Amino acid sequence: MAPRKPAATADTSEKKPVNETNKVVKRPARGYHKFKNGFLNVKPKGGEIEITKSNQESPLLRLPPEIRNKIWGYTLGHNIFRSILIRLGKRKFKYEWMSRPDEPHIGLPLLATCRQIYSEAAIMPFNLNTFVADTLNGERNMLRAFKVFNAHQRKQITSIRLVYKSYDLLGSDALNDFNVYQLEGYRAQLKRLHSKLNTMEFVILSGEVEYLSEEGVAHI
């Protein structure tokens, strides 16, 4: 007959009571959590609550909300993001959005300063800037560039500029017909992705100069 294992004895060691100072705040391995809409969950936990209250007493965060929003808007808006195709291999590539070196850059680091600023301003880079997409590689790739954002983020975009690189159409009678035809097709596609879209620009690019035709601005 096999010997029996001794019964496990209960751990009678004294445990420290859990309080706010030794409470473990559970977080993912990356140290932060995102909502399904793509924005960070910045609700403070544990000892972070006191830090958040302290930040609220700063002169900047004590300003009226309408003034704070203007400051966030000047810092995070009124600039241009361009879709950049980055090749990762023979058949692999990805899109990123950035400004050209010669263009103003928005102050995205502002969103990393504190939780209150992030919660008030995280949406502004989407609805206060113009997103420029290159249609040279076709409509499918142009739409793919916007899909680096999730559905909720895409819905916040209000201004899009489509850039078409062409030398044959410039100065020709076909330019106006081309604008109208392309705008109608792209407008229908983009409106489904961007419910708040109210301005779409169509630009013909020749060399290093962008020409905006009179028919090239559509208010949707």
Image (tube, rainbow, N blue to C red):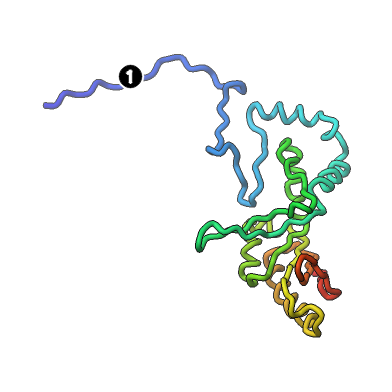
For label 1, the residue is: 9
Depth check: give the residue in front, 113 or 8. 113
- Quadrant the N terminus occupies: top left
Q: Residue furthest front?
A: 207
- Classify residue 140 as left or right of residue 90: right
Q: Looking at the rendering, which quadrant does residue 126 occupy? A: bottom right
Identity of the residue drawn at 67% across and 29% down: 48
Identity of the residue drawn at 66% across and 59% down: 84
Depth check: give the residue in front, 79 or 35. 79
Q: Is residue 118 above or below residue 185?
A: above
| Callout 1 crowding tier (Cα within 10 Å): few <14, some 14–19, many ≥20 | few
Q: Is residue 48 above or below residue 197?
A: above
Identity of the residue drawn at 70% across and 64% down: 133
The local secondary structure at tag 1 comes to loop
Q: Residue furthest bottom?
A: 173
- Classify residue 191 as left or right of residue 7: right
> Which amino acid, by three-letter code, is at mark 1?
Thr
Q: Is residue 212 above or below residue 181?
A: above
Residue 200 is situated, as x and y percent measured from the top left of the image, at 78, 67
Residue 153 is situated, as x and y percent measured from the top left of the image, at 68, 55
Residue 7 is situated, as x and y percent measured from the top left of the image, at 27, 21
Q: Is residue 196 above or below residue 6?
A: below
- Quadrant the C terminus occupies: bottom right
Q: Looking at the rendering, which quadrant does residue 42 occupy? A: top right
Q: Residue furthest left?
A: 1
Residue 63 is situated, as x and y percent measured from the top left of the image, at 87, 36
Tally of numbered tags: 1
Depth check: give the residue in front, 24 or 95. 95
